Every structure is written in structure tokens, then in C-alpha cells.
Amino acid sequence: MSGLPTSEDRLRSLMLASLAGDSAAYRKLLADLSERLGRYYRRRLREALAAQVDDLVQEALLAIHARRMTYDPNRAFTAWAFAIARYKLVDLLRRSRAQAHVAIDDVADFLADVDVSTESAADLATMLDTLPERTRVLIRQVKIEGQSVAEAAASAGMSEAAVKVAVHRGLKALFNRFGRKR
């Protein structure tokens, strides 16, 4: 590692400083988030809704501002902020009934700059432990270790379709258990 702070470290530091009353840090945080949210929304919205990006960024920033006191400093800041951003995107899509590409496993964008720590790995293991063993193993193989569905199916003695269904249902169960808490 180069010793340089990751984006997660920098954003988290700015958030903590802003919560302590540092207005300059808060302005830097909002400016950085504004750029990141703009990129996030532009990648997901089709041309019909591309004009909504600026409004969506503002809605997300307002929601982050309104909920800033709920941020847990022991958790990843980017995951918290982009969860709020994703809810704003889903709200827009519901209002417009438009289609956009928002995959259920689109977590990579939320955590692109986050260094997965031992604590995060432990949280993930705790969450996965709530699932049946077969589902837990399949999610680990496909979503965490990067195996193809075909490889996971071969190792589990299942069809590829059955693996896809099991992984999808497992992710949905995790989202229902842990993703809707506010």
C-alpha cells in the first residue's frame, strides 16, 4: 500500500470533521460527493432521465445533510452515503416509471474506494451466517470470490439456473434483513 489515504478515508475524515463543526470540511465533503453522485447517477439513467441528474444529486445531498447525525463513525461512510443515493434513484424511477440499470448486486460502485477491513469482513460473515449453508457458499463463490455461475454450479452439483436462483434469493433475503434499516 502506498500510504496515501483512500477516498473512503478522506471522505470519512471530512464527515467526522464536519460533524465536529468544521464548515470548511463540510463544504469539501459536499463538493466531492456532488461530483461522485453525478457520475453515479449518469451511469444509471437512460437518456430520457439524464436531465434529472442535477436534481437527483441535490436531493441526495439534502437527504445526506438531513440524516448526517445518523452516520455511524464505525461504519464505511461511502456505503452509508451511496445507500441514501440509491434510495433517491429508486424513488425517481418509481415516480417516472422509467427503466434504468440498477442491479441488486451493484455494491461495487458503493464500495469502489473502500478498503475492506477486518471489521467489514466480520460484518459480512455475520450477515452471511443468517443464510442456509448452501446459499452462503454459493454467494461467497459467485459474488465475493468471483467464480462464474458455471464453476459454482459444478462444485455444488447444481444446474446453473438453480445457482442463479439461490444466489438471487439469498441476496434478496439479506437485503430484506439488513438493507431496509434506517
Image (cartoon, rainbow, N blue to C red):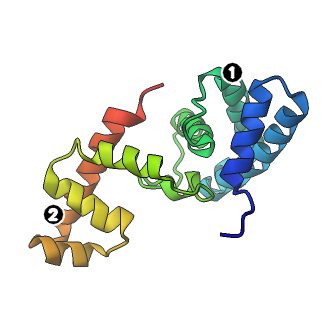
Q: What is the C-alpha distance between the residues marked 2 and 1?
A: 42 Å
Question: Taking 89 as reference, is 14 left or right?
Answer: right
- In the image, what residue type sits under mark 1? Ala
Near-viewer residue (3 or 37): 3
Task: Identify the residue at image location x=43%, y=27%.
Answer: 181
Please tell me in which quadrant of the rendered image residue 19 appears: top right
- Local secondary structure at mark 1: helix
Near-viewer residue (56 or 115): 115
What residue occupies the far left of the structure in this picture? Answer: 157
- Local secondary structure at mark 2: helix
Residue 110 visible in the shown view: yes
Q: Would you name the residue on which mark 1 appears?
A: 66
Residue 50 visible in the shown view: no
Please tell me in which quadrant of the rendered image residue 86 appears: top right
Which quadrant: the N terminus?
bottom right
Query: Count the marks: how many?
Result: 2
Please tell me in which quadrant of the rendered image residue 91 appears: top right
Near-viewer residue (37 or 32): 32
- Local packing at callout 2 (Cα closer than 10 Å; few below 14, some 14-19, many 20+) is few
Task: Identify the residue at image location x=85%, y=41%.
Answer: 28
- In the image, what residue type sits under mark 2? Ala
Circle number at residue 162: 2
In primary-sequence order, the first of circles 2 and 1 is 1
The vertical placement of 133 against 74, above or below, is below
Circle number at residue 95: none
Near-viewer residue (17 or 57): 17
Q: Are the residues flagged by discs 2 and 1 in contact, CB closer than 8 Å?
A: no
Task: Identify the residue at image location x=59%, y=23%.
Answer: 70
Tell me residue 42's x, y (percent).
68, 55
Tell me residue 99's x, y (percent).
51, 50
